[in-house]
Every structure is written in C-alpha cells, then in structure tokens.
Amino acid sequence: QKEVEQDPGPLSVPEGAIVSLNCTYSNSAFQYFMWYRQYSRKGPELLMYTYSSGNKEDGRFTAQVDKSSKYISLFIRDSQPSDSATYLCAPSSGGTSYGKLTFGQGTILTVHP
Amino acid sequence: NAGVTQTPKFRILKIGQSMTLQCTQDMNHNYMYWYRQDPGMGLKLIYYSVGAGITDKGEVPNGYNVSRSTTEDFPLRLELAAPSQTSVYFCASSGTGGTEAFFGQGTRLTVV
C-alpha cells in the first residue's frame, strides 16, 4: 500500500463548479497536510495546509482532514479557468521534516470557460 | 526575489554520461531537497540536507549523489546516466520552523 493515494483524474469541470479533490494516507505520524498546486512545466507551489484534523478555509479553497479515517480533501468553490493545474496532496510529519514530503500522484484539473 | 534557482532547465544525456544538476537558494534556508517527478506521478524524494555538511537519503537515492558545502548550494550528481533517470528534477528548500517548501522551476532530463 502506498503511503499516500490520490485520485489521479483527470478532472474536467465547467467554470463555476465545485471541485472536490481527495487523498488517503496510511502513516499515522503525519501531522501537517499540505496541498501544492503545480502549473504546467512549473514547480509546485504551496496552496494551503492544515494541521491535524479539521477544516481550513482560504478564499474559494477549503482543506479538510479527518485523521480518524486518514482522509484528506480539498474543495474549490466557484472554480475558475485559472485553477486549471495539477493538485498534489503532500502530508508531512512536521518538525524538521516540513519539506520532507510524501506526495500523492496528483490530480490534473481542467476548468472550462 | 530569486528563491530557488535550478540549472540547466533542459538536458539530453547519453547512457553512461555524467552530469551535475545545480541548485542554489537565496533565502538562507537550512533544509534543501531533491525530488524527481515522472509522468503522471507525484514527486519522490531523492536526497535531502538539514544543513551544510549533512545529507541523507530519501526514497529513491540509487544512481545519485549529493553534497552540501554551503547553505546556498545543493548540487545533484548523476554518475552513470541510465534511461530510468529520465525525469523532471526539482530542488526545494525550507526554513527552520517554516511549513512551506519552496521549489525551483525544475530540470527536464532525458537519457537516450
């Protein structure tokens, strides 16, 4: 079993749709749950992160973590064509390991005008 | 702000050749990382460093070497290139107590 599993997609939605991106993980040591966004031919950029279980909202984006079921979600409301990218979930055990990430496979999202 | 800079951006190598992928950061970060990304896959950690003079293996270190003589630089060395090393390589850095890893733009390497 992979440490982090992510639905690879691809996912294609119309502009304005609500998008749900999901990951599962197996390592109980993970405390920080990052979402990175990667545009084509670019390096990943941190979109947002959540510490432990719970929700975190940032504008149109909401991250959810359920540690009891080891399930990670990212919701995008009112999706825009500029949201078209690959989204990577990346948990970390934190501390000195913030950059020592275990990435999911990534979900390719396309938002059509 | 330069951030994390990788050179070269593209490279084609023949099987058995060697090369060094360069990575430098100007954020005074202690931690630096090398990842590889294969098509349709997430990133996998090759090597990482927690400070000058200290390096450690990640998930996929075979066929690679690293060194960290300064805080700013973290080069990745391929000694005998193989087709399986065809990939996009990303260097990243993070600061003490920070939760974000900053990535470079990547080096696209093809081994033929």
Image (tube, coloured by chain):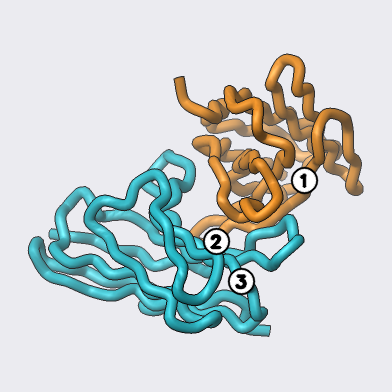
Q: What color does chain B have in the rendering? A: cyan
Foreground mark, 3 or 1? 3
Tags 3 and 2 both on a single chain: no
Q: What color does chain A have in the rendering? A: orange
Task: Return the chain for callout 3.
Answer: B
Q: Look at the numbered disc 1 and give the secondary structure of its residue.
A: strand
Residue A65 as seen in the image, left or right of residue A108: right
Is residue B65 or residue A13 the one in the foreground?
B65
Q: Amino acid at mark 2?
A: Gly
Q: How many C-alpha atoms fall within 10 Å of the one at disc 3: few (<14), some, or many (≥20)?
A: some
Q: Amino acid at mark 3?
A: Asn
Res B30 label? 3
The answer to whether residue B19 is seen in the rendering is yes
Q: Position of residue B68 (x, y in %)?
A: 43, 75
Q: Residue at x 44, y 50 (%)?
A: B45
Q: Position of residue A63 (x, y in %)?
A: 81, 36
Q: Position of residue B74 (x, y in %)?
A: 44, 74
Res B72 label? none
Residue A112 drawn above or below residue B52? above
Could you tell which of marks 2 and 1 lies nearer the N-terminus?
A: 2
